[in-house]
Image: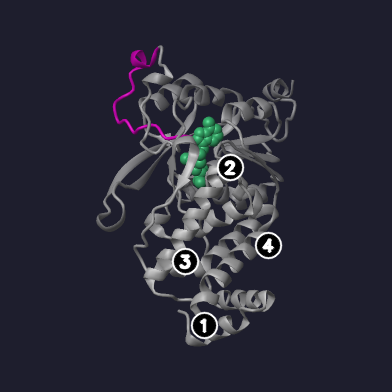
Amino acid sequence: MATINIDSQLHQSSHDKKLFKDNYISFIYSYKHDIKALLAYGGGKYKMRNDLNDIFNNHLTKYNHYDTYVDGFYGMGGSFKALSDSLQKHGVKTVIVNEINTCIITMHENIRNSPIKMRDYFLEFVRTEIIIPYKKLYIPIEDFLKVKQKMIQRFNELQKKKEFGIETSTLLIMLSAFNFSGMMSFKKGGIISFGKPIYEFDDIDDFFYKTIKRIDTYSKLYNRFDMKFFNSDYLLMYKEFKHRKNTLWNIDPVYLKEDYREYNAEEMMNLQNSDIKECTVNYSQKNFNHIGTLDSLSDIDFIYNNNVSPILYHYINKLDLEYKPFNRKELITSAKNAKVKNVVELILYKNNFKQPLNNIFDSKSLEKCA
Ligand SMILES: C[S@@+](CC[C@H](N)C(=O)[O-])C[C@H]1O[C@@H](n2cnc3c(N)ncnc32)[C@H](O)[C@@H]1O
C-alpha cells in the first residue's frame, strides 16, 4: 500500500517530530479500517455479540434498569465491546472492569486516559527505529524482524521490572499486530510472551496502519462511559461490589476443559476445585477458584459463559439459571497447518434481583438494597 511518495514525505519530515506525526496520521487515515476487536486474544468474546445482546435486551432488562456494568474478567474487553451500544442505549453510565493481569489492565486504563501519549510513543518508535535509519516505511522482512525483536526485548525488560506504563501498554498493542506470533501467551506469574516470527506480510500493514486506529477506536468507546479499572482477583472485587444496586455483571472466567458427558447429580456432590479440569489456556492462573466463581452467581444479576461441562448443568439446576448454547470454532494448531475444532460453550444468565420496572418495591429488590 505504501508508495515511494509517502516514503520520501515521511523521511523528509522525520527531522521534525510534529510534521512527521501529522504526515503519518493523515497517511494512515486516508485508508479505512474497521477495528472490531482491540487485540487477538484467547477467549475474546466479540464473536458472541448476537447472543450477548439478545440476553441483555430481551431477557435481563425486561425486569431491571441497570446503571452500572461490571466485568469481572475483562481480558481484551470483547464482551464489553459487544454489549457497549446496548448498554449505552439502555442508560448504563458506569463501567467497572477488573482483570488480574497488571499489564493488560494498565493498557486499558492508558487507552482511555492517555491515548495521545500512546500514539506518540508509537510514532516516535516508527520515526527513530524505521524511517530515520532505513529512509522508508516498508523495509525488507529481515530488517523488520530485527525491529520486532527490539520491541520484544524492551517489552520483556519492562515486564521483568514490573514497570507497567505507556511504553508496555503501547508495545502490547504493537506486538499484537503479528497474527499467530502476535497472539499473546502467558508464562509463570502472568508474564506475557510473544513469538518472534512474522508469518504474513499483511501483519506489517496491520502494525503500520492499525496500531493508532486500535488505540483511537477503543479510547472513544471507553470515553462514552464513566469507566473504572481494577487489578484484583475476581472474588475480592466481587465482595466489594456485590451489593451495588442496578448492576449487571459479566463473568467470562478461566475456561473449563469442555466435557460433553451427561450431568450426573451424584457425581457433582462434594465437588472440589482440585477435581476440576481446565483448558490448557488458563492465563497462568493456577488453581483458579471455579466453584467460588460459580457460587458468586447466586448474589448478582449476571451473564456468565464457559465451555460446556456437567459442572455448569449442576449450577443451572442448583441456582435455577437460564442458559443458551453457543458454538464456536477453536484453532488447535498455529501458523501454517492450522486446524479447527468445534466447541460448545454455555452462556448462563439470571436476573436474581428482579425489579419490575413499574413496581420498585418488589421484595427481592429491597432484599438487595438492605
Ligand atoms: C476468557 S478471558 C476474558 C475475555 C474477555 N471477556 C474478552 O472478550 O476479551 C479471562 C480473563 O480473566 C483473567 N483472569 C484470570 N483469573 C482471574 C481472576 N482470578 N480474577 C480476575 N481476572 C482473572 C485472565 O487474565 C483473562 O484475561
Q: What is the three-letter code of the residue carrying label 2?
A: Lys
> Looking at the rendering, which quadrant does residue 352 occupy?
top right
Position in image of residue 335 (x %, y %): 31, 56
Mark 1 Cα-neighbour bin, 10 Å: few <14, some 14–19, many ≥20: some
Question: Which residue position holds label 4?
Answer: 116
Looking at the rendered image, the disc whose residue lies closer to the viewer, 1 or 3, is 1
Q: Which residues are magenta?
A: 253-269
Residue occupying the point 34% across, 33% down: 258
Residue occupying the point 51% across, 69% down: 208
Predominant SS along the magenta part: loop
Position in image of residue 44 (x %, y %): 47, 47
Q: Rounded to the nearest whole Å, what is the CA distance between mark 1 and mark 4? A: 24 Å
Chain-order first, disc 1 or disc 2: 1
Q: In this image, 222 relative to 140: left or right?
A: right
Looking at the rendered image, the disc whose residue lies closer to the viewer, 4 or 2, is 2
The answer to which of 314 and 21 lies nearer the viewer is 21
Label 4 with label 2: CB-CB less than 8 Å = no
Does the beta carbon of the residue at mark 2 sit less than 8 Å from ligand 1?
no
Chain-order first, disc 4 or disc 2: 4
